[in-house]
Image: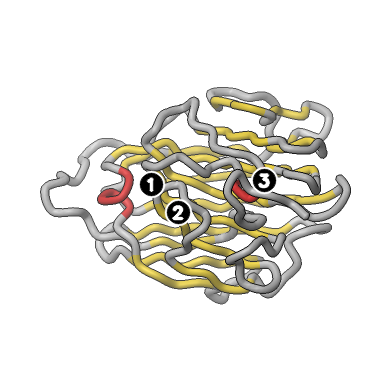
Amino acid sequence: MSYRTRAKGCILTVALSLVAVATPGIALADGPPTTIDYPAFLDAGTLSLNGTAAIEPQSQVLRLTGGGYRQEGSAWAGQQIDLTRSFDTTFRAYLHAGTNRADGIAFLVQSAGPLALGSWGGGLGYRGIRQSVAVELDDYPNPGDPAGDHVGVVLRGNPDYHLATAPTGTPLYGNPFSVRVAYDAPTHGLTVYVNGDQPTLSTTVDLAGEVGPRAWAGFTGATGSVTSTQDILSWSLTS
């Protein structure tokens, strides 16, 4: 059994398409667009790495957890993004090795800062990061989780409660998978795509209202009493 610091499941961050409306009182930015592009992780570059997160130079991946017990890692891009703008992000992830599947990964936008790191186990490395919205990819059925592998949207660093969940339709453990997140600022819509062009999950969330107008984007991952190696193979984001 894999435990959260307060019980919750395995999470992987999945391909998402997000759409958001600007919050009243938060001005839309006029500045240049943001571009993040890691076709491979040759080095850390401007990434802020915390906990067990590290760059593996031989395999050229961002490794959030390395197969040990009770690990948590986070990685944040050095350039903040403007959440009053639309954005589109894609990444490939690979959850493998270890003793079994657990606990999962998440894609986050958060305003707590580049050192932000949550708890191990079902906390998926983001529990306790209150100024955040997480898209989790969860492959371990902790109490309160849906049955089977799922994608979830979680507010305020509390993985015990989901804004929305849906089955991924594809195994999250054992083979690389692709995720897309597209956020459209005018509508607050959020759509998740995992390994394909058909929506996996759709909901609405005001990212700027939940997190603030500017945020760090990146990933978290964790293990508990069951382990796996959890890698991000590539990542791009434009806004």
Q: Position of residue 46 (x, y in %)?
A: 53, 23
Q: Is residue 85 left or right of residue 182?
A: left
Q: Position of residue 230 (x, y in %)?
A: 74, 44
- Specify the label residue 121 is tagged with: 3
Circles 2 and 1, Cβ within 8 Å, touching? The answer is yes
Closer to the camera, 199 or 115?
115
Residue at (73% x, 37% y) in the render:
70
Q: Please state which amino acid type lies under the numbered disc 2.
A: Asp
Indicate whether 20 appears above or below 203. Answer: above
Residue with the mark numbered 1 = 239
Corner quadrant of residue 170:
bottom right
Residue at (41% x, 61% y) in the render:
18
Task: Label 1: state its secondary structure.
Answer: loop
Q: Is residue 86 left or right of residue 227?
A: left
Q: Position of residue 145 (x, y in %)?
A: 61, 66
Residue with the mark numbered 2 = 88
How far apart in space, not on screen, are marks 3 and 1 (Cα)? 32 Å
Residue at (54% x, 48% y) in the render:
107
Closer to the camera, 228 or 141?
141
Q: Please state which amino acid type lies under the numbered disc 3.
A: Gly
Q: Is residue 41 left or right of residue 164?
A: right
Q: How does the figure colour the protein chain or chains?
A: secondary structure
Circles 3 and 1, Cβ within 8 Å, touching? The answer is no
Q: Please state which amino acid type lies under the numbered disc 1.
A: Ser
Q: How many tags in the picture?
A: 3
Of the two numbered discs 2 and 1 on the same chain, state the one appearing first in sequence.
Answer: 2
